Image: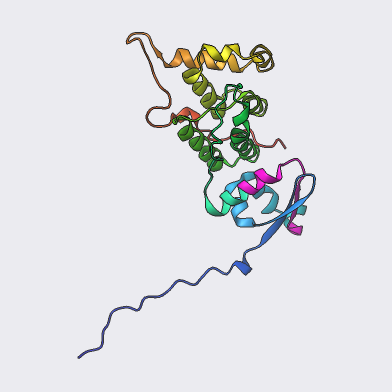
Amino acid sequence: MAPSTSPKTVTPAKRKFCEVSTVTLLVGKSKKPFHVHVNLLCDASPFFKAALAGKSKESSEKHMQLPEDDESTFELFVDWLYCQRYEMLPDDGDHEDDGGDNTDERFLQPFRLFVFADKYNVCKLKNLVIETLFVDGRGPLRGPGHRAIAYAYNHTTQGSGLRKLLADWYAWNIDLGWYEFQDIDAFLRQQPDFAPDVVLSFAKNLKWRHKQIHNPFAGDMPEEYKDKEGPGLQE
């Protein structure tokens, strides 16, 4: 019997992580160290690419400080870098009519992550956060309260996909009871862009001819929620 002439299966060489350079990022006021592969940071963010792939001090020393960033948010960012995932905190089940403050932390986490990704122009992560919020908004769970809304509006600019999503959620879900909360007047005064966004959303989704209101959370996620590129850090 003639010997088999089938080509041998060649197993690709395993990547040697010892040959991939890392950078130490000291995050927050406590300077918590994170050791991250440079290539992942550069692929994800033009800011980190400019800082780490050139001839800057950070590039030569493989050391960088991010004192203004939140440690827990950066940890979520690193998890996304390596695993390409993000999940919101589970609902605590407390749906008491308190203006939504009991759910704020659940939404503050993705809002902080979105703002971080916007700051460093990590577009893929921004859109993942938006998609996660959109899917959550289709369910029966309680939406963001005033503190979370204020954070989102204070840290984004007009036209942000996050603002559009939040305005659509409120336009679709709030009822007259929302206006009875004790702090509603003060909240609307402090966030002058929020009420016009909600009114615009309501008008946009209202179909007068058919006397129907279009549910923005039915079907596929609107393209307008996606942010192609944020303002990033100014040079």
Farthest residue to the left: give it.
Answer: 1
Please tell me in which quadrant of the rendered image residue 67 appears. top right
Please indicate whether residue 71 sits to the left or right of residue 228 in the image. Answer: right
Please indicate whether residue 55 sits to the left or right of residue 197 in the image. Answer: right
Residue 6 in the image: x percent, y percent?
Answer: 28, 79
What are the residue bounds of the magenta stretch? Answer: 60-76
Where 38 falls versus 197 (above or below)?
below
**Which residue lies at the image location 35% right of the left edge and 79% below the top edge?**
8
**Which residue lies at the image location 59% right of the left edge and 51% below the top edge?**
79
Farthest residue to the bottom: give it.
Answer: 1
- Report if residue 220 lies within the magenta region: no
> In what quadrant of the picture does the C terminus appear?
top right
Task: Please name the colour scheme applied to the rendered image.
Answer: rainbow
Please tell me in which quadrant of the rendered image residue 184 appears. top right
Residue 224 in the image: x percent, y percent?
Answer: 48, 27
Q: Is residue 40 visible?
A: yes
